[in-house]
Amino acid sequence: MAPAVSTMLSRSKRGLFSAALLAGATTAAPVKKMTAVIKILEDMRDEIEHDQAEDEKSYAKMECWCKKNDMTLSEAQAAAQAELERLRASVTANTAEAAALATELEGMEKELKQARESLDELITMNTKQVEEDGKTVAEYTESITALANALTVLNKHQPGLTQKKVVLELRKHVSAHSDMLDALLEPSQRRELNAFLQQDTRQNQKQNPTSPAYSSQSGQIFGILAQMKEEFESDLATLKEKVASDKVTYNKLKKSKEEGIADLEKGITSKTSRKADAKQEAADAKQQIADIEKTMAADLEFLAEVKKVCPKSSEEFAKRTEDRHMESQAIDKAVEILGSDENRDLFDKTVEKAPALAFLQTGMMKNSKEVASKVVQNLARLPGASVSKTALNLLSQQIKLAPFTRVVEAIKTMISEIKEKKEVETEQKDECVSKMNENEKETAAAENELSKFRGQLEKAEADLAAKMDSLTKTETAIKEAEESLGKLEEDRKEEFAMFQQNLADQSTAVELLGKAIAQLTMVYENLAKPTFLQTGLVVKKQAPAAEAGPSAGLTHTDAPEMGTYKKNNAGTGVVAMLQGIQDEARKTIKEMRLQQEQDQADFQKQRDLLVEVKQSSELQLSTLKFEKADLDKTISQKNRDINDKVSEIAGLVETMKSFKEECDFLLKHFDVRQEAMTTEVEALNQAIAILKGSDAGGELQTIYANPTSL
């Protein structure tokens, strides 16, 4: 609106200048000069009021825009700042958690490495110990065999080559167990043994092996070797027990270490997964922080521009209002001065009577009717919207009151203003076209991105549906595995209870049989070993021996003799039978235990399989939930992207609407207005040419006296 103010001020100055000319001029025209001047001033005041009203409308829109953007952007900044604080706290927490997990994992990795090394060391030591024990057992076995052979040879008093071989073999084993023999044998026995082993076999072959010296020496050596054999056998049995005990201890320790390693590996897997989650959450939060900060920076920049432009706009509006007010006051005062009754009478007496000026104008403008006619014709062709009523009246008065040189200057000023206005409108039109084209490009790009986001959202939603289906199936598999596991454990519990009951019954039977056998054994332990028939509870009665003498074959009629007690020979058979039954019961118990171990192994195998299926399904479920969470995040992000893009497009549409409101009138009428202004300039130039080439006579005086013809 500043150019309009400048134009109006310049018009006011021209009006006041014309009024000054009119104040010293005299004319014979019937229309009073002061009346014409007041009319110009009133038109100027009307234009000022119109411009002020339009300016107030524009300022109201600007003020609304400022308040809306200031409030909206400030609220957005506050909300974004709160979100930033939350995200930064999330980054800090997740980063700290990831660091803590990394430290824990480092310690667990070291612990796992040490555990594996410890297990490897245990296996290596056990392998070495097993090899050494096996070698020692073999050596003991070989030594015992050699001693047995030597005892056999000495027992049979076999001389010659056989004894030589035995001595050579014994030398090797005595040398191998030298330390043990030193502790086992008395010094005298060791000397006897060494002497025996170091004897000259060739000399022994010449000796009589049946001589008393030989027999005496062999007896002593036989006793030493028998003692050695007995000690070796005892040591071998102890060694085998130790080997068996070491194997049990090794298996328990190995199992414990393997379970510890498995627990560490499971813990490492869990913490590694959580560490990755924490890092990803921190990275996502950082990306969101970057996006928010970028948006905030753009908003702050725009908000700063709003805060810069809006106060300046208010200041400029206040300044324009003040300038218009001052201008309007000046016009009002001028009108008051010129139009008051008192002053009007004064002007009638003074400026309205100017014979000298009329004479001057009459002398300067010959044939002025023709000149004025051409000027009026050219001005009449100008569009009414291009030349203000005030300007025409002012020009009309200048034509009446001033020499043609002043008229020419006034027309030139109008031409300059028209050209300036033409250039301004051209620049405004170019700016409008540029802004609208840029808006269209941005809108098209935003719509393309919106379409892309919607496609990505559809894909993510389809993937989510597939994940949900997989989640349902996996949860069903876990539930089925848990139910199967529960049923398996319940069945196994019932089987074990039945086994315990049967085992208790069998054990009770063995115990009762043992008690019975113990009772019978106390009675029948002195009986001879039962025969096969006795064992079968078939007692073969022996026929009574025939009696010699005259009484043979006669029946005794004497008083019967008292019977004597005799243990039943079948007792041992009963004991043997009970022992057989007891042995069968023990065998049944053993078979039951073996079957129980097999059932337990089968149960454990099935249970491990179900647990593996359950754990695998749970791991898959965890992975699916993680993937679902990622898809949920993606869908949320895409929805936010779509909403942001829709808002952006809406903003662009509003901006385009604003551009159209500002530019539609200009663009629609640009060519017409440009052509009109060009025509106006041409007409004014033609008027200048006419005025410069005219012969100043007195013919225009009549036209000047009738300004309405202009």
Image (spheres, rainbow, N blue to C red):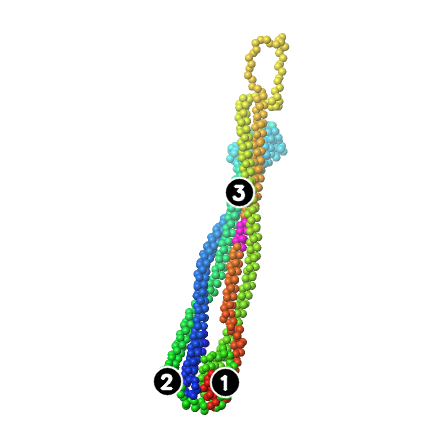
The amino acid marked with disc number 3 is Lys
State how far apart marks 2 and 3 are (Cα).
Answer: 131 Å
Classify mark 2: helix, strand or loop. helix
Q: Report the mark closest to the observer, 1 or 3.
A: 1
- Label placed on residue 255: 3
Question: Around disc 3, counting alpha carbons within 10 Å, would you say few (fewer than 14), some (14 to 19), or many (20 or more)?
Answer: few
| Residue depicted at 46% across the width and 58% down the height | 83
Classify mark 3: helix, strand or loop. helix
State how far apart marks 1 and 2 are (Cα).
Answer: 34 Å
Would you name the residue on which mark 2 appears?
346
Residue 264 coordinates in the image, percent (x, y): 51, 47
State which region is magenta.
Answer: 619-631
- Residue 612 sits in quarter: top right
- Residue 517 sits in quarter: top right
Residue 241 coordinates in the image, percent (x, y): 54, 36
Mark before the other along the chain sequence, 1 or 2: 2
Is 289 contained in the magenta span? Answer: no
The amino acid marked with disc number 2 is Leu
